[in-house]
Image (cartoon, rainbow, N blue to C red):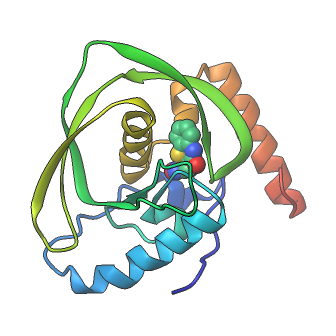
């Protein structure tokens, strides 16, 4: 187990479309364990594998508030199979865009199909923070960031700020 460095904007790896996990689940266990450790250390509510530089369709989420009662959820090859007409707005953040927040509108509820670490097909219906978070993470698997859902003005502003900071070799 190890905490891995986070991939930060404007790193072009954040724009990759991640590869399906496929059937070789055993190799995924070490990755998942590093993702959980990195997510809890950050701390973050969710993490997509590409955020530690691995372009595979693996997501970890823990929306529980209590760090003494952790409830890690692991999603391999997750897909949204249904989303509600009702939307909700949430002030989102991203570990790959530190200390920047913006309001994103997404479906309030989603059904998600995925596989677990035992290679079993699962389906859940999510609402609240879990629904927001799983959509944010599936976006990462497709090279999409929450800032892509903001106005062009806001997106350009934050992109430039992080590009400038990277050039100077400092945090934004
Ligand atoms: O820690 C995180 N919090 C969060 C808050 C609102 C909406 C989405 C998220 S996910 C984020 C961690 C992260 O960047 N996951 O990709
Ligand atoms: Ni994110």
Determine which quarter of the picture holds residue 39: bottom right
Quadrant of picture, ligand 1 = top right
Horizontal and vertical percent for residue 71?
41, 59
Q: In this rendering, does residue 53 appear at all?
A: no
Above or below residue 77? Residue 26 is: below
How far from the left and from the top, in percent, is residue 145? 52, 41
Residue 77 versus residue 86: which sits nearer the camera?
A: 86
Q: Is residue 1 left or right of residue 19?
A: right
Q: Is residue 75 left or right of residue 144?
A: left
Residue drawn at point x = 58 percent, y = 60 percent: 67
Q: Which residue in the rendered view is the most extreme toward the left?
A: 121
User: Eyeballing the image, is 37 above or below 122?
Assistant: below
Query: Residue at image x 49%, y 49%?
Result: 64
**Residue 83: quadrant of the picture:** top left
Tell me what residue is drawn at x 49 percent, y 61 percent: 69
Q: How many numbered marks have been drawn onto this rendered protein structure?
A: 0
Residue for point 52% across, 55% down: 14
Is 146 displayed left or right of 143 in the figure?
Answer: right
Asked whether residue 40 appears in the rendered view, the answer is yes
- Asked if residue 54 is positioned above or below residue 8 in the image, the reply reads below
Please state which of residues 16 and 114 is positioned toward the viewer in this rendering.
Answer: 114
In the image, taking residue 141 as reference, residue 35 lies left or right, namely: right
Closest to the observer, 167 or 39: 39
Vertical side of 133 occupied by 17: above or below: below
């Amino acid at each position: 187990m190890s905490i891995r460095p986070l991939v930060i904007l404007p790193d072009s790896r954040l724009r990759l479309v991640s590869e399906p996990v496929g059937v070789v689940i055993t190799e995924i266990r070490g990755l998942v364990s590093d993702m959980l450790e990195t997510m809890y250390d950050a701390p973050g509510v969710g993490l997509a594998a590409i955020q530690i530089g691995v372009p595979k369709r693996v997501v970890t989420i823990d929306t529980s508030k209590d760090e003494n009662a952790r409830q890690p959820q692991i999603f391999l090859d997750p897909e949204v199979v249904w989303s509600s007409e009702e939307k909700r707005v949430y002030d989102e953040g991203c570990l790959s865009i530190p200390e920047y927040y913006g309001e994103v509108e997404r479906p309030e509820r989603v059904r998600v199909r995925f596989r677990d670490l035992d290679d079993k097909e699962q389906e859940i219906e999510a609402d609240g923070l879990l629904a927001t978070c799983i959509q944010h993470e599936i976006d990462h698997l497709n090279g999409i960031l929450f800032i892509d859902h903001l106005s062009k003005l806001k997106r350009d502003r934050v992109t430039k700020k992080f590009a400038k900071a990277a050039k100077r070799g400092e945090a934004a």
